[in-house]
Amino acid sequence: MAGEVDRSVSQTVKAQLALRDQILSGSLRPGERISELQAVETTGASRTPVRMALVRLEEEGLLEAIPSGGFMVKAFSERDISDSIELRGTLEGLAARFAAERGVSARELEPLKECLAAIDELLRQVPISIEAFSSYVTLNARFHALLTELSRSPPLARQIDRAAALPFASPSGFVMAQSALPEAQQILIIAQEHHRVVVDAIENREGARAEAVMREHARLAVRNLRLALRNRTHLDLLPALALIKTATD
Amino acid sequence: MAGEVDRSVSQTVKAQLALRDQILSGSLRPGERISELQAVETTGASRTPVRMALVRLEEEGLLEAIPSGGFMVKAFSERDISDSIELRGTLEGLAARFAAERGVSARELEPLKECLAAIDELLRQVPISIEAFSSYVTLNARFHALLTELSRSPPLARQIDRAAALPFASPSGFVMAQSALPEAQQILIIAQEHHRVVVDAIENREGARAEAVMREHARLAVRNLRLALRNRTHLDLLPALALIKTATD
DNA sequence: CCCTCCGCTATTGTATACATAGCGTATTCA
DNA sequence: TGAATACGCTATGTATACAATAGCGGAGGG
């Protein structure tokens, strides 16, 4: 062991990425205690970086400290997830409001509008292809990231990132959760309409409207998550689903 | 050194508390690089727990990683702080809404009402004594904590804690920041009125009203923070103030 | 047959030793 | 005299050794 280590990235980051992937991919089951030694073997890093990674993942919300020591994979109720989505929507609503009220130049709005147009292009296909859907996920994430950035509020951006750390609470994770629904494309079209309205509201400096539509965006997401979770059969391909405790509340 | 260590709490927690105190008390200036070795000496813990504490404080938002390695104390603009307060208000607004919409029994509302009554009692003094003010800070923090708890949303509670980590963004830190203002007592009375309304709204299951009043509560806080920061002379007694960059935006 | 107590083992928490990279300084050359 | 390069030191990143504790299993007694 330790014969050759990748020196291009720090061992800590490497361990963090590897462990997060293991958690989200379902290799580690919720409630399961994470063995440091095992993590050392699977990640190739030594105990110190592994421990740092574990601490970071705990702060991130994916792990939970065990009183007697060590960490376990956190389990989420369906409500935890829907709350997190609504939470993110509320935060993004504030971001949109900030962007609108603080003013955004046409130059700054450009990338957002390009994003919008690119998504429009994709949605023109009926039904949407797998590749186009994949592009949609990327563009959607970019749209949300740009919106966050336009708030010009690092503390808010930080919180939004945090809120998106939970499984399915990120824009991408959420979209993928719904991909199996029959009405998926219709949902994407409505979501895109929201996107369009928020850009318009920001452009016209209508803070309240910008905020309201982002919150509606999140409520739509919550409703669809519920639908998607009823369709569990279609969702077996999403390993992160295992993190959601079944019938807990 | 290291002759006797306190075994009652973990070294990591001890180091984290000590370092946070050093940051918030101004012993470590913003922008300053934190020396691990120095931290080892001042905290009495060894390098491993110190490093864990540093990682946690970074996630908490008080430290910033230096690209070349190590950490520095983060500096905050006045806007960062006011954004954080508004952010917390928005989150607490959501918590109040959740509490109202999800229903709270009379039994659960009891502690909140007791808190309210106790604060009323304190505010009856004009002018308020130092001891009473100190009690106010505690009771106010308790009120906000209870409110958060009534949302029954662990993810939301987590985010609220996070948002309160920045200097002055916590209920206590914020109240203290205004303590030197001449109109301080009047402010506390208005704030208490907000508290009363939110409890009433929750009791009557008026989610929108509960949310609105908590956001107004935060806006009041932001306005008063601005006032307080103009009165810097009065605030020299608050060392955490040094974390706020002067005239940055 | 079950419950309790003792001891062992495995795993985490802590400390320290080692490697490496970055930065500052000093010296030399142009 | 100034700038550039090389050398060395210091501080961080990493690895591993040591210590303590908690959980578990077995054995003995009731």
Image (cartoon, coloured by chain):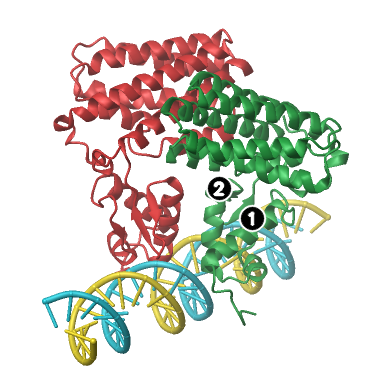
Chain colours: A red, B green, C cyan, D yellow
Q: Nearer the viewer, residue B159 or B147?
A: B147
Q: Residue at x 63, y 39 (%)?
A: B115
Can you tell which quarter of the image residue B229 is in? Answer: top right
Element type at marker 1? helix
Q: Which disc, if any, is residue B20?
A: 1
Q: Chain of mark 2?
A: B
Gap between marks 2 and 1 measured at Cα: 10 Å
Tell me where residue A9 appears, x and y as whole percent. 42, 53
Above or below for A33 versus B102: below
Mark 2 closeness class: few <14, some 14–19, many ≥20 residues within 10 Å = some
Q: Residue at x 27, y 26 (%)?
A: A226
Residue type of the residue flagged with mark 1: Arg
Assign the N terminus of chain B to one quadrant of the image: bottom right
Assign the C terminus of chain B to one quadrant of the image: top right
Residue type of the residue flagged with mark 2: Glu
Q: Nearer the viewer, residue B204 or B24?
A: B204
Q: Chain of mark 1?
A: B
Mark 2 and mark 1, same subunit? yes
From the viewer's perspective, tell me whether residue A133 is left or right of residue B148: left
Q: Which disc, if any, is residue A81?
A: none
- Whether the residues at callouts 2 and 1 have beta carbons within 8 Å, the answer is yes
In this figure, which residue is indicated by the disc labeled 2?
B60
Above or below for D12 versus B133: below
From the viewer's perspective, tell me whether residue A73 is left or right of residue A235: right
Tell me where residue B104 appears, x and y as whole percent. 46, 32
Element type at marker 2? helix
